[in-house]
């Protein structure tokens, strides 16, 4: 019987070959996970549709479990996240999109908070978020502020999706996970003094080279992202206020 991991990472994937070029970014995310200080994790990859290429690539990825939805569901990956949550075995859950960049201490910092105090239901951290090629840092607060899905790790035992995630409609439904926890009195803890632990989106924004972790080949980033710094989402979709 397979032993459960401490952390379960859920990544929805879709590749339209134009904007997301998801399969290329997934390789970068794999490099991020290979370099994590905390290696007690499983990586649940859920492709929204069917992809022979992604299926083959995932066999080479670290601690990866691959699933396909069969028929494309859309809704910004929420059906894939919902499906992925039902497959995980870890104590802690983190939702990482295919084009997120993680620093080496991302998993260790967030999980250490939960290890230290069982009364803390979720931990949050700052990340880099940017538009118009201007690097900015998102420092989340629990009482009020802006939360992005990459910012938090949550205990599996206190989260319940029950299908509403995929059916509530609109973009960014994953943010309601945190709102649901806060509304139900679940305690969270922010770690702002350590600095950003990740980059929200490598695709739509042109980050300065020095922001990326040293193990990422920046020439690969340039090749995937190109020279575009156009924000293809409305600003309201980048933030969620608690």
Image (cartoon, rainbow, N blue to C red):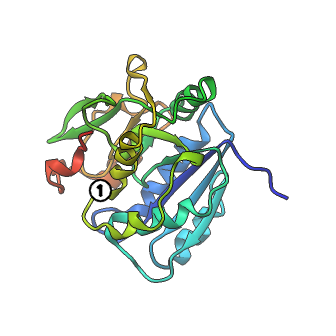
Q: Quadrant of residue 143?
A: top left
Q: Furthest-front residue in view?
A: 184
Q: Identify residue for label 1.
A: 172
**Which sits in the foreground, 136 or 93?**
93
**Residue at the image position 69 percent from the left and 40 percent from the top:** 40
Q: Quadrant of residue 206?
A: top left
Number of numbered discs on residues: 1
**Which sits in the foreground, 239 or 195?**
239
Position of the C terminus by quadrant? top left
Residue 173 visible to the viewer: yes
Q: Furthest-top residue in view?
A: 193
Q: Position of residue 121 (x, y in %)?
A: 51, 36
Residue 23 visible to the viewer: no
Horizontally, residue 10 falls left or right of residue 222, namely right
Q: Is residue 52 above or below residue 198?
A: below
Q: Position of residue 215 (x, y in %)?
A: 51, 35
Q: Secondary structure at mark 1?
A: loop
Q: Position of residue 197 (x, y in %)?
A: 43, 30
Give neighbour class at mark 1: few <14, some 14-19, many 20+ (Cα, 10 Å): some
**Residue at the image position 23 percent from the left and 32 percent from the top:** 135
């Amino acid at each position: 019987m397979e032993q459960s991991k401490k952390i379960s990472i859920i990544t929805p994937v879709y590749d339209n070959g134009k904007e997301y070029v998801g399969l290329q970014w997934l390789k970068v995310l794999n490099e991020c996970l290979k370099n994590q200080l905390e290696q007690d994790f499983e990586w649940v990859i859920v492709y929204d549709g069917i992809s022979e290429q992604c299926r083959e690539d995932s066999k080479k990825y670290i601690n990866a479990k691959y699933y396909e939805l069969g028929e494309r569901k859309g809704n910004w990956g929420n059906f894939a996240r919902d499906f992925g949550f039902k497959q995980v075995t870890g104590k802690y859950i983190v939702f990482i999109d295919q084009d997120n960049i993680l620093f080496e201490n991302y998993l260790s910092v967030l999980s250490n908070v939960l290890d230290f105090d069982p009364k803390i239901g979720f931990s949050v951290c700052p990340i880099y978020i940017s538009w118009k090629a201007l690097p900015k840092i998102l420092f989340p607060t629990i009482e009020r502020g802006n939360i992005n899905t990459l910012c938090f790790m949550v205990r599996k035992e206190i989260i319940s999706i029950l299908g509403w995630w995929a059916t509530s409609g609109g973009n960014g439904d994953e943010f309601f996970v945190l709102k649901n926890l806060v509304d139900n009195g679940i305690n969270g803890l922010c770690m702002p003094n350590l600095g950003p632990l990740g980059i929200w989106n490598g695709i739509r924004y042109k980050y300065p080279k020095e922001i990326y972790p040293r193990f990422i080949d920046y020439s690969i980033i340039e090749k995937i992202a190109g020279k575009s710094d156009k924000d293809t989402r409305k600003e309201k979709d980048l933030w969620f206020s608690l």
